[in-house]
Image (cartoon, rainbow, N blue to C red):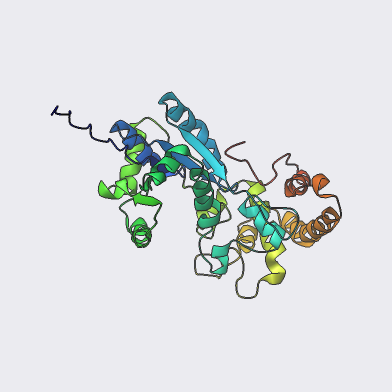
Amino acid sequence: MIALPPASPVIVPPPPVVLAYGIGVDSTALLIELHARGQTPDLVLTADTRNEKPETYAYLDVIGPWMRDRGIHHEIVSYTPKRFKHWPPYYGILEMCLTNATLPSKSLGGSSCSLKYKKAPQDAFLRTWQPAVDAWGRGQRVTRLIGYDAGPRDTARANHALSIDDPLYACEYPLRDWRWDRPDCVARIEAEGLPVPKKSACWLCIANQPSEIRDLPAWCLRLIVLVEARAAPRLHTVEGLWRRSTRARPGSMTAFIRTERLLPSTEINRIVRDAPTDLIRFQDVAAAIPLGERPTMTDWLDRFHLAFGERGRGSGPALAA
């Protein structure tokens, strides 16, 4: 009998590695250090809420070329509406608030907006990304890297995330494994010769501190006033975007903006008095126009900004624009 050579072992490719990149301090430090260690992720994935702070959009002009120079695959995704009750459909948190006369869910005591405007768009993209599809076909879970650091705030967030068993993803937190806290992350970015990004967050978020509201440009402040004025008739248990007053600040960001004189009182009064009514009228008129010809919320927002000498801002810049 002729002896057959031993069969070659079947080599199973490792699952792909995806970095959830929020363009903040922690995730930027994580990206830089992974590349330095020869562990560059297969994909860097950013979800655009369309209402990030202006500094976050500006930082893409810094980190984008850095990634391209190193051949790092970076994709930007955002929420896309499929069903909607009212016109116009909304593509971001601001437009959702204005369309539905409400506040972000966290301001109302609900869950994080991140699930709808960050996690869901990333999951939708990965469902069509071939390396992920192939891995799931092999019975593997895609490795998802998240930039939670070793500080106390992120420790609580990581502990909650670890309690969730996802059949499609295996989440890892390298910064915590390295025991890096926020100062370590800042130092790593500076050592790379890059500027340190500002805190990444939606400028409508309840988590913003008074100092962060003071730093916003006037067009963002006007939109904050607009959101609270539009939602005001339906607010019964909260004062505004900050929910309820504390010793440090009022529950209403509009009240803070007025007290701090971040906008002229005449502008605030004008927005509160006129803008919500004008927006409702716009929605009513748009609803009677054939679907393919209807104006969008961006059209109305452009007109809103133009009334204060700002041109073409809509709901703000977009990462993928």
Quick one: quadrant of the C terminus?
top right
Pinpoint residue 279: horizontal percent, then vertical percent: 78, 57
Q: Is residue 103 above or below residue 219?
A: below
Judged from this view, the residue extending furthest toward the front is 1
Tell me if 67 is positioned left or right of 215 in this view.
left
Tell me if 219 is positioned left or right of 294 in this view.
left
Front position in the image: 288 or 64? 288
Judged from this view, the residue extending furthest toward the top is 69
Q: Residue at x 61, y 54 (%)?
A: 93
Front position in the image: 63 or 173? 173
Residue 250 seen in this snapshot = no
For the image shown, how many numbered marks are present on the structure? Answer: 0
Quick one: quadrant of the N terminus?
top left
Q: Residue at x 41, y 45 (%)?
A: 137
Pinpoint residue 297: horizontal percent, then vertical percent: 74, 50
Residue 149 seen in this snapshot = yes
Q: Residue at x 57, y 68 (%)?
A: 108
Tell me if 143 is positioned left or right of 299 in this view.
left
Judged from this view, the residue extending furthest toward the bottom is 236
Q: Residue at x 37, y 44 (%)?
A: 138
Tell me if 218 is positioned left or right of 33 in this view.
right
Pinpoint residue 312: horizontal percent, then vertical percent: 72, 39
